[in-house]
Structures are given as C-alpha cells and as structure tokens.
Amino acid sequence: MSFSVDLSRFKVKSQKQAKAVIQKITMEAFKRVILRSPVDTGRFRANWGAAIGAATVGTKESFDKTGSATVAAATLTVFDWNCAGSIYLVNSMAYGPKLEYGHSKQAPAGMVRVTLSEISSHYGAR
C-alpha cells in the first residue's frame, strides 16, 4: 500500500469519527434542553424543533409532556446531518425567554444555559 492510500483511508475514517462525535454531543445537548423544559400542558416542550442549515420558525399546536416524541424528532434530524451546515434547536413559543430566565419553578436556572454550561465543562478544551 502506498502512503497516499493510507492517508486517504485515515482521512475518511477521521471524518466519520468526527461526524459521529459531533452528532453524539449535539444530541446529548438537545435531549437535555428538551427534557429540562418545564411542563404544564406540554406545548412548550413539543415546540422544540431541530433543523439543519437554518433555524425553524413558527409554533406547533402539539403537546409532548414526556418529551419523547420531541427528542425522537430531534434525533432523526441530528443523524440526518451530513457535515454541511449548522444544526439548530429552536423553540418559537413567545414565553420561551421568560422560562429560560427564571420564570418557572421547574427550571429556575433555565434549560439552555444550564445545558451549555454542562456540555462545555464536560467536553470543553482542556
């Protein structure tokens, strides 16, 4: 085998591994945010939407108290990602910022900020 063939194989393998790591960490973060979301009717939790390339807009009339359907939908999106474009998690409910900044007793420290802090400290540069 030639050195260039070895390098080509290494490149392909490295790209696959990097993609898998990015997807794993992204899904871990998305799942934490979704499941940390306070629940009354389940509508806020159901309105988390994952998207590739551009953030989603608008709200849904669905409800998901457990978060399982929302996590499942986000998982499909994240594992559809092909290393092109950013992956977004957005909730367009008007009261989302209030929930993130302490309006809920269920999530007084928010959902996104707590998750980002955890993910950063766990996977951050050392």
Image (tube, rainbow, N blue to C red):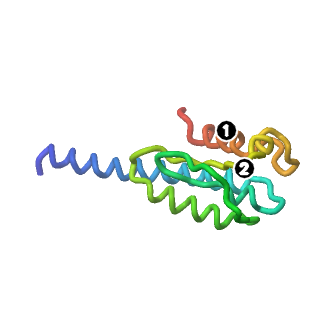
Q: How crowded is mark 2: few (under 14 residues within 10 Å), some or many (20 or more)?
A: some
Q: Could you tell whether 89 is left or right of 78 in the image?
A: right
Q: Is mark 2 on a helix, strand or loop?
A: loop
Label placed on residue 93: 2
Q: Residues within 10 Å of mark 1 (few under 14, many from 20)?
A: few
Q: Earlier in the sequence, mark 2 or mark 1?
A: 2
Q: In this view, does 126 lie above or below 30?
A: above
Q: Which residue lies furthest to the right in this view?
A: 105
Quadrant containing the C terminus is: top right
The residue under the point 81% across, 62% down is 41
Image x and y of residue 73, in percent = 57, 63
Q: Could you tell whether 53 is left or right of 2 in the image?
A: right
The residue under the point 64% across, 52% down is 58
Count the numbered circles shown.
2
Q: Mark 1 points at which residue?
A: 117
Image x and y of residue 97, in percent = 75, 41
Q: Which amino acid does label 2 sit on?
A: Met
Q: Could you tell whether 16 is left or right of 120 in the image?
A: left
Image x and y of residue 63, in percent = 73, 65
Q: Nearer the viewer, mark 2 or mark 1?
A: 2
